[in-house]
Image (cartoon, rainbow, N blue to C red):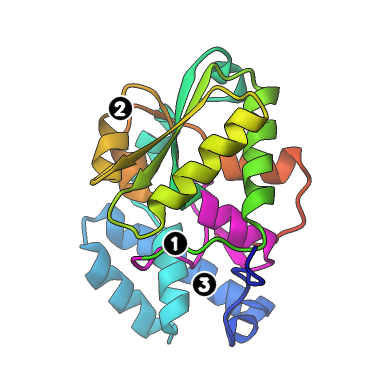
Amino acid sequence: MNSRNRGKNTGDDTLFGSEKQISKLKLAVEDMRYLLTREYPEKAASELVGNRYRLKTRQIQALRGASASDSQLHNRRLKHVETLDLKGRTVYLDGFNVLILLESLLSEAYIFEGLDGCIRDLSGVHGTYKRVNQTLIAVELIAAFYQKNQIQKLVWIFDKPVSNSGRIKQIILEFAEQHQLNWEADLQFNPDKFLAESSEIIISSDAWILDHCKEWFNLIGYLIREEKLPVNLIKML
């Protein structure tokens, strides 16, 4: 196992660790929602708001993740399912999105609750996925969720072009075999499109997927509550 994690970046405490910065971000999210609702393009809106509040690059990243238009929020709310809806169902999980977010959360990085109630982080896959100290704990948390809610089958979807995607797929399948879980793992060239077009319940915090999928479940929010995870959570509402 690598001795590494997905914790905070240098400087994150300055950007997100004070009440003053958080208040500023909340105001920025309100402005961003106003502009997006009036159909300003996201990039232009975030530049405008970023300039107004003198936000740094990572703060703008958090702002964009947390914001949405009124119609997006309404649409996402309508499609969100509750834990009771999961029993006996097949669920598709956005592999890297969920895994990296959980690894960040467990590494005490800052995570953000957006207007849609979804939790997001500031990490991402940049062409390569590297397993970290928290990877196995993240998989165990997902296994506990799967068993507790009597899900019929869980299918992990990973980006085929990301290097090491085959390796993490193997780790997931070996874990499932050891613990007798009805899991599958699949590599897709365009996982976002695949998930958005699926008729099954989706687990992801990717905004585009949430806007286009049929049904989704807020797994990270559930795990924070259910497992009482200690988190550096900033509510952007």
The image quadrant that residue 112 belongs to is: bottom right
SS at mark 3 in the image: helix
Q: Residue at x 69, y 49 (%)?
A: 137
Question: Residue 70: which numbered mark, if any?
Answer: none
Q: Is residue 88 left or right of residue 70?
A: right
Q: Magenta segment range?
A: 99-127
Q: Residue at x 69, y 67 (%)?
A: 108
Query: Whole-percent x and y of residue 139?
Result: 62, 44
Task: Give the distance between the C-alpha atoms of the residues marked 3 and 2, in whole angstroms.
Answer: 34 Å
The image quadrant that residue 156 belongs to is: top left
Q: Is residue 217 left or right of residue 32?
A: right
Q: Residue at x 41, y 81 (%)?
A: 57
Q: Is residue 85 above or below residue 28?
A: above
Name the residue tied to disc 1. Answer: 129
Dot 3 or dot 2, earlier in sequence: 3
Question: Residue 25: which numbered mark, if any?
Answer: 3
Q: Is residue 176 visible?
A: yes
Question: Residue 198: which numbered mark, if any?
Answer: 2
